[in-house]
């Protein structure tokens, strides 16, 4: 019962937030809407007993990635005319149609999944099972992820610095 | 009863909205945000499935996705900043050097 | 039939072809004497080899049958085996001797006639090529090799008729010859294919064996039904197809129209190709395939009828022609008709005999007319000639001998051969054909003597300048005339029939080749010697009547021809204009084909459909696919995302609902 309420309420807010995100002209508004979506998703994660992932969602996604987005948006500081006027082009119509079709297919796929949910082990979604998996079975992806992060850091620093004056 | 199917449908809706955003918006940053939304939808689907199957591997994978998404966001936004510096615009329509 | 193998037959066609090669490549740089030496020498060598084979080699073969010389295996594909092989039996002996002998004389004659022509080397190249191809034709041991020769002589005919090609009319005459021949060749090819289909063999010896071993039943079976006309035998259809080829090559109805136009070529060419040799190829072909024709009485009847009708038809045209060469051309068509009557009534040796004697006197007639034209400075209209016998005695006397021979007067050669044909036509049961040939003989005598009287007798109607230049031709031209005249007299003496005390050597000599016809002929009723004498007298009588009438109209009362022409203008005009056949063919056949080719095939089919297809394909790739697809590269990232989605959509759809 409680799960149903949580699902429907937070699900609706997430959908509305996503809709807002793609329709707002001001990129700051879009960013904030996305933050709302992420928070709702975190709530849904909690409802799914994925407590650690929910925490990570808030800390990493909403707290770091979205803040980064906001930084960049405000750094660019686009004026009204720079933002441009909305245009309706053929490719947009096609894209929307394709997306709707895609949605239909996704729903069709989703409805085919088996509905029963099995029982959960002790400590499902807690940090200990995750850690156990992360450092044994999925050790290699873990290490590689760290390399990816390193590459991202280096790349971002190199890309974003201003040109040095030639001495 | 909220079953796996419900979560999958919700994930699908969010994914589609993100796809529409990628298609319909011209502001590169907003396109980027739509991509993040799509990634989140995938995460949701994965967590829901992990719950249904009782396998924690889904959560681990979600963590990986988040890490990669963060890395990608960092580098991508840096690139957008560079493009703004050079071209003066973040409008996707103006970045059409690959046009026929 | 015994077959022996020999090794040197190929030399006979080889020498002239070698002459062609040499004269063709370096001839224009060699002095004229060398060119003529090469050309005439090569043919003379062929003649010697033919004589060698005829007198020494052939009689040594047991039973005197066949000698075969296989050069190499040409076609060998499945059941079809055609070797490049030459065959020498009595029939080809006669043919090759005639071709090389008369050919040699004409080559010598050409030295004088074409002496001033700038295309001297080219002329002799073509003439040698013709001789080589003709020899391949008569010596071929199978139908494909014969067909090569067939086509080769057709080609040379085209080249030589249109020798002076700068004149459009002459070039067109060459084209006409080739194209009309082609129609006949189509029939010939169908015949060859059908023969192979039914008998499995294309060489003459092999075909005869196949027929003996049961091929006869295949051939005499019915082929396809023609409804009310019944079901013809296979062999009838094949023979008629082959005969179509013969009508084309030998200028019979309905494909004779090219021969009169062929007179546009140099006169020695007319003599060699269109009198003595090429046009006889059709007769040779029927004679060679006698074992086929003997199986089908329908085909024989058709051959004889066409021959007879052609004979009298073209004789009536020759009556009114004013060009000396045209008279001789129609006369040739007519005499070829006689030859076909001969082989059609299954008197094969008579037909070949007439072929031989005709080669002598017709070549002589043409060469003599060439001499006249040469003296007249190129004038060919008989109305402008006359009284030439004082100026050109040798030409006159040889010409007269040839005319008497062609009219069939005893004891010249034409009498024996033509009379033999007429007698056999009656004796073998073709009385109606005898009748039309008999009338034709009279007309022949009439118009030939008309020619002689108009050209050589009376007052000279040429203008003053031409009269001054009238002279006898040089020795290179008159010596062949004399030789041919001698042959025209004595050539018939090999075929003196029994009733006149002779032993008809030539018939008995060639007869073994035609053994297939023997069973059919044996079934015919016997005729008495008295009957034969009657017909001899009838032939002589009508010839004499023709000559007398001609003398009466053209010597005694020379105003008569003009009055007669005025009395019946439609008849006269019909004959003078050759029954308007050329105009009819032009309107009925040529124009529709030209129009179809132009408006339908070219303007519609080629331009719209063929070009349309090609251009359309190119257009498809360039405009539709190229231009269209490149618009996908818009440079805008959003559209690329749409394409991703589209792809994912399709793949998902496939996975969901199809598999």
Image (cartoon, coloured by chain):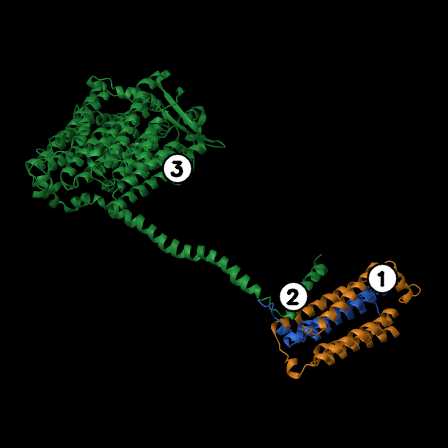
Q: Quadrant of residue C87?
A: top left
Residue C128 image point, x, y percent: 30, 33
Chain letter for the orange colouring in the rendering = A
Chain B, hue in figure: blue
- Badge 2 element: helix
Q: Position of residue C152 (x, y in %)?
A: 34, 36
Q: Whole-Å distance between the Cαs marked 2 and 3?
A: 63 Å
Dot 3 alpha-carbon crowd within 10 angstroms: few under 14, some 14 to 19, many 20 or more: some
Q: Chain of mark 1?
A: B
Mark 1 vs mark 2, CA separation in Å: 32 Å
Circle 1 residue: B57
Question: Is A93 displayed left or right of B7 in the figure?
Answer: left
Whether residue C333 is visible: no
Q: Where is residue A66 drawn, in percent x and y?
A: 78, 75
Task: Report the chain holding disc 3.
Answer: C
Dots 1, 2 in contact, CB < 8 A: no
Residue of label 3: C189
10 Å crowding of disc 1: few (<14), some (14-19), many (20+): some
Observer-nearest of C345 and C404 = C404
Which numbered mark, 1 or 3, is in the foreground of this view? Answer: 1
């Amino acid at each position: 019962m409680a799960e149903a309420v949580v699902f429907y309420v937070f699900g609706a807010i997430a959908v509305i937030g996503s809709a807002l995100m793609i329709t707002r002209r001001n990129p700051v508004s879009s960013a904030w809407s996305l933050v709302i979506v992420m928070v709702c998703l975190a709530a849904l994660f909690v409802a799914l007993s994925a407590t650690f992932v929910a925490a990570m969602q808030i800390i990493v996604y909403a707290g770091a990635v979205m803040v980064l987005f906001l930084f960049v948006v405000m750094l660019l500081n686009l004026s009204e005319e720079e933002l441009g006027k909305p245009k309706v082009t053929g490719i947009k119509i096609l894209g929307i149609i394709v997306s709707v079709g895609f949605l239909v297919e996704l729903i069709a796929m989703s409805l085919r999944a088996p509905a029963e949910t099995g029982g959960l082990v002790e400590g499902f979604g807690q940090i200990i099972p995750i850690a156990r998996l992360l450092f044994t079975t999925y050790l290699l992806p873990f290490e590689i992820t760290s390399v990816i992060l390193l590459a991202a850091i280096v790349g971002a620093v190199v890309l974003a610095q201003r040109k040095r004056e030639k001495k | 009863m909220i079953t796996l199917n419900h979560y999958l449908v919700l994930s699908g809706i969010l994914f589609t909205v993100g796809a529409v955003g990628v298609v319909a918006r011209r502001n590169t940053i907003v396109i980027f945000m739509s991509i993040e939304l799509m990634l989140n939808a995938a995460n949701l689907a994965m967590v829901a499935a992990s719950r249904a199957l009782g396998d924690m591997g889904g959560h681990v994978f979600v963590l990986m996705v988040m890490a990669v998404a963060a890395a990608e966001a960092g580098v991508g936004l840096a690139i957008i900043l560079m493009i703004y510096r050079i071209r003066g615009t973040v409008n996707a329509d103006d970045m059409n050097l690959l046009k026929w | 039939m015994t077959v022996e193998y020999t090794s040197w037959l190929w030399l006979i066609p080889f020498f002239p072809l070698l002459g062609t090669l040499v004269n063709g490549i370096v001839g224009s740089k060699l002095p004229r004497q060398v060119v003529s030496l090469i050309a005439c020498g090569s043919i003379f060598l062929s003649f010697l080899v033919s004589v060698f084979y005829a007198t020494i080699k052939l009689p040594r073969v047991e039973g005197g049958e066949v000698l075969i010389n296989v050069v190499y295996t040409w076609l060998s594909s499945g059941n079809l085996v055609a070797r490049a092989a030459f065959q020498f039996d009595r029939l080809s002996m006669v043919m090759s001797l005639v071709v090389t002998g008369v050919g040699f004389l004409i080559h010598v004659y050409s030295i004088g006639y074409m002496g001033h022509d700038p295309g001297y080397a080219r002329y002799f190249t073509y003439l040698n090529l013709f001789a080589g191809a003709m020899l391949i034709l008569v010596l071929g041991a199978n139908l494909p090799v014969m067909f090569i020769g067939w086509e080769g002589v057709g080609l040379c005919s085209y080249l030589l008729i249109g020798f002076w090609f700068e004149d459009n009319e002459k070039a067109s005459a060459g084209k006409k010859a080739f194209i009309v021949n082609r129609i006949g060749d189509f029939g010939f090819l169908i015949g060859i294919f059908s023969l192979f289909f039914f008998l499995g063999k294309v060489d003459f010896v092999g075909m005869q064996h196949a027929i003996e071993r049961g091929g006869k039943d295949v051939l005499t079976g019915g082929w396809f039904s023609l409804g009310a006309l019944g079901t013809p035998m296979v062999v009838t259809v094949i023979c008629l197809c082959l005969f179509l080829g013969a009508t084309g090559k030998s200028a019979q109805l309905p494909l004779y129209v090219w021969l009169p136009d062929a007179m546009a070529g140099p006169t020695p060419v007319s003599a060699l190709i269109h009198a003595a040799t090429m046009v006889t190829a059709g007769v040779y072909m029927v004679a060679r395939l006698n074992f086929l024709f003997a199986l089908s009485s329908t085909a024989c009847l058709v051959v004889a009828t066409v021959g007879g009708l052609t004979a009298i038809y073209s004789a009536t045209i020759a009556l009114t022609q004013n060009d000396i060469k045209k008279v001789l051309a129609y006369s040739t068509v007519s005499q070829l008709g006689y030859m076909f009557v001969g082989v059609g009534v299954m008197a094969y040796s008579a037909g070949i005999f007439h072929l031989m004697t005709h080669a002598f006197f017709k070549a002589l007639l043409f060469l003599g007319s060439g001499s006249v034209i040469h003296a007249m400075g190129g004038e060919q209209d008989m109305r402008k000639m006359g009284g030439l016998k004082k100026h050109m005695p040798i030409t006159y006397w040889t010409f007269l001998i040839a005319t008497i021979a062609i009219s069939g007067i005893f004891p010249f050669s034409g009498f024996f051969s033509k009379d033999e044909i007429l007698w056999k036509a009656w004796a073998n049961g073709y009385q109606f054909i005898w009748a039309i040939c008999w009338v034709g003989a009279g007309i022949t005598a009439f118009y030939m003597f008309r020619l002689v009287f108009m050209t050589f007798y009376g007052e000279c109607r040429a203008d003053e300048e031409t009269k001054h230049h009238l002279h006898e031709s040089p020795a290179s031209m008159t010596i062949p005339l004399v030789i041919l005249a001698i042959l025209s007299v004595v050539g018939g003496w090999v075929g003196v029939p029994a009733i006149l005390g002779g032993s008809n050597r030539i018939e008995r000599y060639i007869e073994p080749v035609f053994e297939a016809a023997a069973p059919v002929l044996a079934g015919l009723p016997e005729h008495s010697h008295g009957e034969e004498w009657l017909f001899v007298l009838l032939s002589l009588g009508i010839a004499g009547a023709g000559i007398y009438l001609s003398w009466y109209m053209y010597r005694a009362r020379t105003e008569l021809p003009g009055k007669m022409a005025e009395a019946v203008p439609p008849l006269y005009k019909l004959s003078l204009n050759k029954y308007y056949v050329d105009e009819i063919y032009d309107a009925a056949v040529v124009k529709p084909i030209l129009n179809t080719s132009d408006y339908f095939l070219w303007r519609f089919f080629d331009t719209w459909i063929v070009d349309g297809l090609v251009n359309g394909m190119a257009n498809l790739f360039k405009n539709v696919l190229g231009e269209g697809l490149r618009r996908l590269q818009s440079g805008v990232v959003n559209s690329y995302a749409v394409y991703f989605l589209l792809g994912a959509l399709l793949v998902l759809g496939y996975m969901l609902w199809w598999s």
